Image (spheres, rainbow, N blue to C red):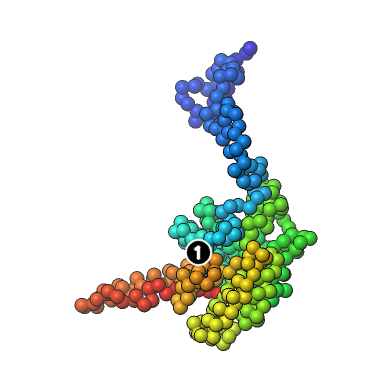
Amino acid sequence: MAALTYSIAAAASPKISLRKPLPFISSKSLSFPSFKPSISLLKPLNPTKFSTLSPRECSPNPSAFPSPSSLKSRLRNGETLYGIFFLSFSPTLAEIAAFSGYDFVVIDMEHGPGGIHESLQMLRALSPTNTPAIIRLPESSAAWAKKALDLGPQGIMFPMIDSPKDAKKAVSYCRFPPEGIRGTAHPVVRASNYGINEGYLSNYMEDLLIMCQVETVDGVKKVEEIAAVEGVDCVQMGPLDLSASLGYLWDPGHKKVREMLRTAEKGALKLDPRDGGAFLAGFAMPHDPPEELGKRGYRMVSGAVDVGLFKNAALEDVRKFKISLKPDSDDEGEGDKDADEKYWSE
């Protein structure tokens, strides 16, 4: 048989000259060192091993099953998650937060200056770290929900949900017809890997965490009904807006605000998530730290905002320098009162 002629790229080994005829290679002598089958073809299969595998692991299309590491799965497994809100829309700071160990990052389009394009950059920064992202919408509308969901976040947060009717609308914005009214461009959007994920339409709701914010007096009155709406996974408390709704804009720690918040918490927790209820999520405050929220049944706790963390660090840095310029200054103990103070955006 005639020898095979190969065109060797310039980057190939210098021991092989270009256009040099090579002898015929038998198929028996071929080897593929990069091919490492996960199951040995030379050993009999062990059926007991495969009985322990999940449907996701055995499926030729794992994306058709909910991820065991998704926020929704972790909540169902009993975990309490700790996250951070982002108003700066800085991909660099988002990476730092992800590598620091936060369980989730909330991209805040309601109060932050960024929009859809900036949110996309945040998602791309977080993706390699496997840190889930939740997008908080600027308003509860079908248009904003559609644009945010097409980016492919793991969660979506709807602000100012005051009734079960509002909650049902929010859920419908997340679902394609006939179950909802979400507009569809699934063959070309990021959420479906630009159409490459063939199982997207079958499982797009499995991992998506739908969060409804209760942050007004009217919302608190209906919180139990809101939590019971099918499709609502989390009820997110908003203590600052709630304090404003009660007339205590400057005093979120007021006794009446705390009492109203406790009423809302009890209503949200009345129905177990396993029986159609919702998980409880919320913001820590200087007068209401994260550990206290955990004790009261919160399963998702947001402990800080990126802008607030930087502000506090910057103020402390300047303070220390100015104090160091004063003769006989003693910096010990100064600023301890405000060192851990953080501010949250509702």
Q: Residue at x 37, y 73 (%)?
A: 339
Residues 68 and 313: in front is 68
Mark 1 is on which residue type? Tyr
Quarter of image, res 139: bottom right
> From the viewer's perspective, is residue 330 above or below residue 155?
below
Quarter of image, res 31: top right
x then y, percent, for residue 76 = 59, 59
Q: Residue at x 56, y 54 (%)?
A: 69
x then y, percent, for residue 183 = 74, 61
Quadrant placement of the N terminus: top right
Residues 166 and 255: in front is 255
Residues 242 and 92: in front is 242
x then y, percent, for residue 13 = 47, 26
> From the viewer's perspective, is residue 285 above or below residue 186?
below
Is 79 left or right of 315, judged from the image as shown?
Answer: right
Circle 1 sits in a helix, a strand or a loop, which is it? strand
Residues 49 and 104: in front is 49
Task: For label 1, count other residues whose C-alpha is less than 10 Å away and answer few (under 14), some (14-19) or many (20+).
Answer: some
Quadrant placement of the C terminus: bottom right
Q: Residue furthest right?
A: 178
x then y, percent, for residue 62 = 64, 46
Q: Residue at x 21, y 78 (%)?
A: 327
